[in-house]
């Protein structure tokens, strides 16, 4: 294991990593730091070819000490699909999509849960709690079941129905809140303070981000250790984009990729776009978004704890923020399914809608290689698709098509 | 490409493979035959390490001629998970599960659709039709969208709601039938006869089985070119078990595995168990099961076209047939989610319920390595889980757990 310490992302205070630590005393999220010089000496790209196709292939850049503590459901190495037909249609011939639908629990949240549950198990955690918009809770419940850790989950009662099911079937204690994820977060924070539970909230422990980071590692490996020109990411809590940025910086430090970084685009819905607003005003932090609502439920996050880190990643890479409407999201979802066969979640569809805007404006050019990050499967969002199918009797005939 | 010809599984008649062919003139399903001597010379196990983790890594044992005709959504190399906690509980310490939830469209049907759509595209098909219990239709619609082939899908109106959604969003023409898959099959058969559409029904074209075969290839590779003692497979149309058997026989012929074969177990629900009944009567074919009904909707197949091939695989490997109740299925589903973190489909859960029976009877011993085949994700079956979650107001507190 090559972890050197935990470092506060706000005040740079250092913490040792072999005990359970949540936020810095200043309130800032902690980031895992590695001895990258040692990693550079010990870790060779060629070693990867003989390792299984899971995110654990990058173990030298991950924080779990003992193999026996790894809690795995086979997560990682999701496909990077060429979208030739859609790319031609929207003027981005070199369009690709990384499909996080093919991962346990059907969303990228599994990556964070796998790392956080593994590390929590390693550090002796037995009782945990998490506020969620749904998918992170589903993943946390599953990995806690696998790890043997108890979990209490609070989610908005407006979260997708399937998220309740997956939390319940995994045996976690589930509560709904008549409010938003920010309300769920406050309820969890009070319980954590009172009962001393491990707090698995976004960025309130340092390891979920290490799991999300592996999307960036995989992208680089899948592109032959080149980076694309642009990555579009649907942004709620923002840990995905923070993780990809962290991955790419670490890969630079160990010399596996060159100086070029992709321009990172934070995609939000017009119904909840605090980070896009902050970006458009060139601010370093976002403000609470009142009356948040979008069909892309997973990114209904009115104020993210890590907003400043997302904005830092966007500014540092000459990226941008783009907000798209629910109509655009649903049209993009349909286009991806009808033209490419991929049924994506609305959050993932938002990235295509944003790419269309950016290509029209000329911010993305036709020569550029562009990656859409689809964060989950559309199978968890049946309500986004309407069906009007005729019912036949057994003796009926089909019309000629 | 190493395909030599197509061979009738009933009368052994040979057909050449470079044109669209459905059933043999005798009515028997056609199987793809390879020049396995040439494969043996040309294909080395060591070549696999540098190939991407999809089913296309076995291209020498697959029927697609040109790489450009491959229609892929990144399918294959699904995880083989140890089930230590459940295994200890049910007396099978070396219990494993191959998790076909992590594949496009969330079920193993993607494998068959990927191969059939690729080959149909290669042979110039532009219009196709399929009767389905739901998941095969979802997969077929997705891969046809990716391939640019039109699809007409007929499914029972009792099929899971998500299957309608995934077919509709992919742009296929969807019809429901007030009946079973056998009724859907008759409607499709009439339309195919009248309009000349390509018939993608189970075993009415030779290539879906080649996709299912890759589960067997992957299992052998994941176990280091050893085979397990027992494989339990949920059996509806039976193509999965037929495919795995075909894979293992081909691996024997090219010398990649030894003489030992796993005992193949056909698992059905007590509400629809035609193959188990035929096995218990030592018959070579099944009879139509009247009044078929089970929560494991995907295996509600009252009479499978390939029943004789399933039974042949079971007899040849000293396997057996086991029927389990819906109650046992739902309890097994809960056990897998709560103890291992895997939310499986009821069809997959049925294999654990069957393993419990066989371990109790001593048919499976505690020393044996046993593989459950989970054919799909539980996310497509929300109705199998009930949820009773308290609703909190933002100011409420959580109880101590």
Image (cartoon, coloured by chain):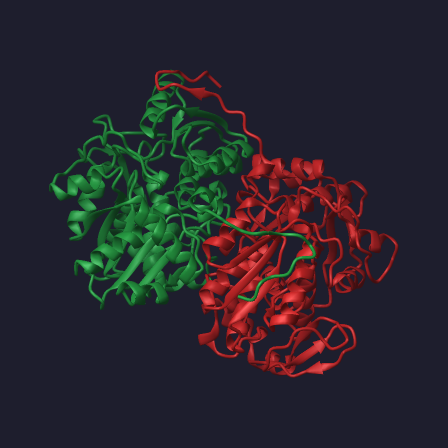
Chain colours: A red, B green
Q: Is residue A205 visible?
A: no
Q: Residue at x 29, y 43 (%)?
A: B235
Foreground residue among B193 and A257: B193
x and y, in percent, of residue A71 in the image: 47, 68
Residue B315 lies, with reference to residue B182, above or below; the image says: below
x and y, in percent, of residue A62 in the image: 57, 73
Residue A46 lies, with reference to residue A379, above or below; the image says: below
Residue A212 lies, with reference to residue A120, above or below; the image says: above
Q: Is residue B238 visible?
A: yes
Q: Residue at x 24, y 58 (%)?
A: B230
Tell me: B46 left or right of B248: right
Quadrant hosting residue A216: bottom right
x and y, in percent, of residue A196 in the image: 61, 73
Quadrant hosting residue B49: bottom left
Foreground residue among A42 and B98: B98
Q: Residue at x 45, y 16 (%)?
A: A399
Callout count: 0
Foreground residue among B19 and B277: B277
Pick the quarter of the image with the N terminus of chain A: bottom right
Tell me: A312 left or right of A204: right
Q: Residue at x 48, y 21 (%)?
A: A390
């Amino acid at each position: 294991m090559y972890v050197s310490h935990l470092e506060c992302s706000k005040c740079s205070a250092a913490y040792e990593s072999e005990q359970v630590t949540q936020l810095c005393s200043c309130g800032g999220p902690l980031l895992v730091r590695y001895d990258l010089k040692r990693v550079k000496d010990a870790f060779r790209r060629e070693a990867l070819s003989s390792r299984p196709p899971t995110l654990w292939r990058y173990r030298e850049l991950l924080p779990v000490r003992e193999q026996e503590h790894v809690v795995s459901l086979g997560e990682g190495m999701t496909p990077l699909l060429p979208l030739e037909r859609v790319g031609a249609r929207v003027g981005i011939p070199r369009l690709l999509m990384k499909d996080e639908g093919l991962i346990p629990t059907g969303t990228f949240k599994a990556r964070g849960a796998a790392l956080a549950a593994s590390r929590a198990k390693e550090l002796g955690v037995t009782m945990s709690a998490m506020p969620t918009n749904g998918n992170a809770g589903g993943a946390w419940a599953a990995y806690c079941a696998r790890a043997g850790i108890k979990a209490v989950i609070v989610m908005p009662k407006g979260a997708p129905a399937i998220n309740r099911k997956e939390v319940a079937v995994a045996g976690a204690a589930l509560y709904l809140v008549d409010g938003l994820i920010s309300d769920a977060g406050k309820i969890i924070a009070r319980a954590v303070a009172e009962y001393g539970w491990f707090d698995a909230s976004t960025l309130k422990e340092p390891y979920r981000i290490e799991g999300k980071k592996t999307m960036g590692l995989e992208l680089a490996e899948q592109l032959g250790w080149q980076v694309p020109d642009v990555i579009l990411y649907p942004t709620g809590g923002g840990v995905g984009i923070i993780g990809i940025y962290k991955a790419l910086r670490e890969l630079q430090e160990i010399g596996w990729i060159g100086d070029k970084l992709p321009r990172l685009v934070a995609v939000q819905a017009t119904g909840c776009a605090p980070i896009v607003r902050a970006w458009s005003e060139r601010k370093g932090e976002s403000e609470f978004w009142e009356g948040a609502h979008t069909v892309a439920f997973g990114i209904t996050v009115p104020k993210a704890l890590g907003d400043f880190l997302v904005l830092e990643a966007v500014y540092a890479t000459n990226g941008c923020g783009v907000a798209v409407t629910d109509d655009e999201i649903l049209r993009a979802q349909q286009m991806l399914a009808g033209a490419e066969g991929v049924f994506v979640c609305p959050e993932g569809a938002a990235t295509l809608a944003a790419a269309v805007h950016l290509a029209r404006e000329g911010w993305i050019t036709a020569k550029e290689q562009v990656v859409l990050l689809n964060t989950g499967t559309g199978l968890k969002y049946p309500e986004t698709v309407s069906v009007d199918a005729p019912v036949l009797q057994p003796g009926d005939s089909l019309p000629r098509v």
